[in-house]
Amino acid sequence: MRCFARGDAALPPEGDAAELYELTQEILEGAGLPAYEISNHARPGAECRHNLLYWRYHDYVGVGPGAHGRIVADGTRFATRQEKAPETWAARVASTGHATAERLPVAAADAVAEAVMMGLRLAEASTARASPARPGSRSTPRSPRVKSRGWSPAAF
């Protein structure tokens, strides 16, 4: 982003950017690489499972400096955060075996909001069957997004 602040690069006008985005979608879909999330394309079955864990609101453990995680333990969903500064992180790992700076319970309403926000990145619909309001539940795709890219009320 510094290059934009310095004036070394410029974003195209909004209309041009939208046209380039649509052209990119068309070209990649035509090449057999449909979008499976807002910024990634892959052949069906070759999607990045690592990213899909986040967008489907599954458990993930943040390990390195500044990393965040969402895990269910003892029936409660927790938000975790590691020490941010690498030196502090390394010292905490050396002395205690981990560098978790925060481990806070996530309220059910907040978990639902997080799951919806994360799921908005995906081309697949959200699911109500695996509500993050139920600790320990998992999100799994239920139905594809309708052609108009709108949301099916049945998906929530």
Image (cartoon, helix red, strand yellow):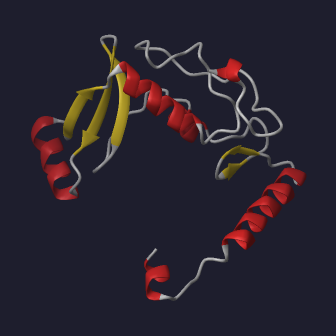
- The x, y position of residue 85, in whole percent, is 21, 57
- The x, y position of residue 48, in whole percent, is 63, 42
Check the picture and name the quadrant holding the C terminus. top right
Instruction: From this view, report whether residue 120 is shown above or below residue 113.
Output: below
Q: Nearer the viewer, residue 28 or 107?
A: 107
Q: Is residue 113 left or right of residue 36?
A: left
- The x, y position of residue 86, in whole percent, is 22, 56
Q: Nearer the viewer, residue 18 or 51?
A: 18
Q: Quadrant of residue 61?
A: top left
Residue 46 appears in the rendering: yes
Which residue appears at 73% of the width and 36% of the height?
A: 150
Instruction: From this view, report whether residue 127 is shown above or below residue 91.
Output: above
Residue 98 appears in the rendering: no
Which residue appears at 75% of the width and 35% of the height?
A: 45
Farthest right residue?
Answer: 30
- The x, y position of residue 21, in whole percent, is 74, 62
Which residue appears at 9% of the width and 41% of the height?
A: 95
Instruction: From this view, report whether residue 152 is shown above or below residue 150.
Output: above
Q: Is residue 111 left or right of residue 38?
A: left
Q: Quadrant of residue 10?
A: bottom right
Instruction: From this view, report whether residue 99 is shown above or below residue 116.
Output: below
**How many discs mark residues in the rendered view?**
0
Which residue appears at 82% of the width and 63% of the height?
A: 23
